Image (cartoon, rainbow, N blue to C red):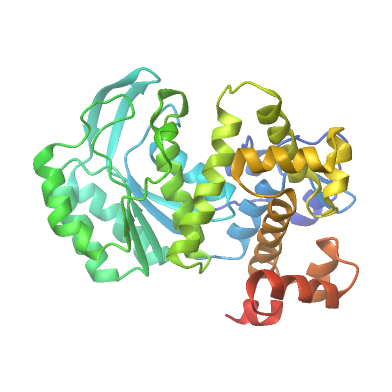
Amino acid sequence: MAITGINRQKTDKKLYDNPPSHSYGLPFTMPMIAQSEVLFVRKRTYFCRLTKKCFLCTMNQMRPILTITGSDPTSGSGVQADIHTISALGGRAVSAITSVTVQTSLGIQEFYDLPAHIVERQIEAVMNDMQPEVVKIGMVRRLDVLDVIVRALTKYHPRHIIYDPVVMSSLGEQIVPMEVHKEIVRRLLPICTIVDVRQLGEEVRQPSVHGLANRYSSAVAVFLGRGESKTEALRLAREYIHTQIVRATDTQGRSSDLYKKFLDTLDVHVLTNSDVHFYAENLNVSTRYLAQVTKRMCGRSPKAIIEERLIHEIELQLNTTDKTVQEVAYSCGFSSQAHFTKFFKKMKGISPTQFRKS
């Protein structure tokens, strides 16, 4: 989806004193940017940076991620959730729809499977025009649709193919006929990079967090597209989804609430402050207590969480803007380019310049 008609100079000058307090939930979509022509900025701090990411990715022609799957009108799963997750992580999503569903939060009521030639034309159009290097495949319910998908993948040879097995719904409903599933196993799986990425535990199968397994595979696709190894992409995707679980479920207790507030505060201040003490003070707790909370909730220290979020922001700017390394360093809160380079090498093993060239 391309954004047209945006005056970037005009947009960047609009200042808001009460920006959105969250960004990983991504309440603002790309069409909404096009309508409002607003990016939320104050004193060079992006309060809705993930919306900014969508804008930058579109403007800089990054290789998109193609998702081939069905639709979910509730947006909990399907192509809607794929687009949401890929955009939230700084990627660009394109799609080919295999099936339209009629469903509510209580289950699927009806399917309309698109004809194979329509699915084929969607895939061909995207492949020829956008040249995606990562393809994610979800719901495939017809043998002739499977035929055109396998032919396209064999013809275009994307760098990564991810199959997220969609056989049963989170409510235990049969989605894909078994004869189709058997052919998927025989014909599609051998050409995939990653198959069955659902390694999150029982919590993702609960109805209250419908679609999290689907979002997990979308996150894997983004991290593979960024050049991460399979092992690292799976790890980063698990961490992202566990964050979503905390935010999406109504868990009780001080730890869950505090952890969510910490992540929300980090969304706002990551480019201006990487000090654990700052976040602890902001939350009115000790640094030790904050460390205990993050250890309990995700098994990691506040410092590690902050650094990983910061390095993701840095990678995004290096990949999607024409800023110099020095400009990226200053925009991410570093006092000197030398300090910035040292931090980047510690996190990625190479210099920012080498990363940008690669």
Indicate the position of residue 351 as horizontal and vertical percent values: 69, 80
Name the foreground residue: 145 vs 329.
Answer: 329
Q: Decide if residue 96 is on the left or right side of residue 200.
A: left
Position of 103 relative to 42 (above/below): above
Residue at image location 67% in from the left, 57% down from the top: 308
Percent coordinates x, y for residue 23 in the rendering: 68, 41
Q: Is residue 61 above or below residue 71?
A: below
Apparent side of residue 47 relative to residue 241 in the rendered image (left or right)? right
How many numbered marks are there?
0
- Res 21 quadrant in image: top right
Quadrant of residue 309 within the rendered picture? bottom right
Residue 142: x, y in percent? Answer: 15, 43
Above or below: residue 112 compared with residue 9:
above
Tell me where residue 91 sits by quadrant. bottom right
Q: Residue furthest top?
A: 106
Which residue occupies 87% across, 32% down? Answer: 284
Q: Residue at x 54, y 55 (%)?
A: 236
User: Which residue is painted at 61% across and 46% down in the image?
Assistant: 299
Judged left or right of residue 206, residue 138 is left
Quarter of the picture containing the C terminus is bottom right
Let me know if residue 30 appears in the view.
yes
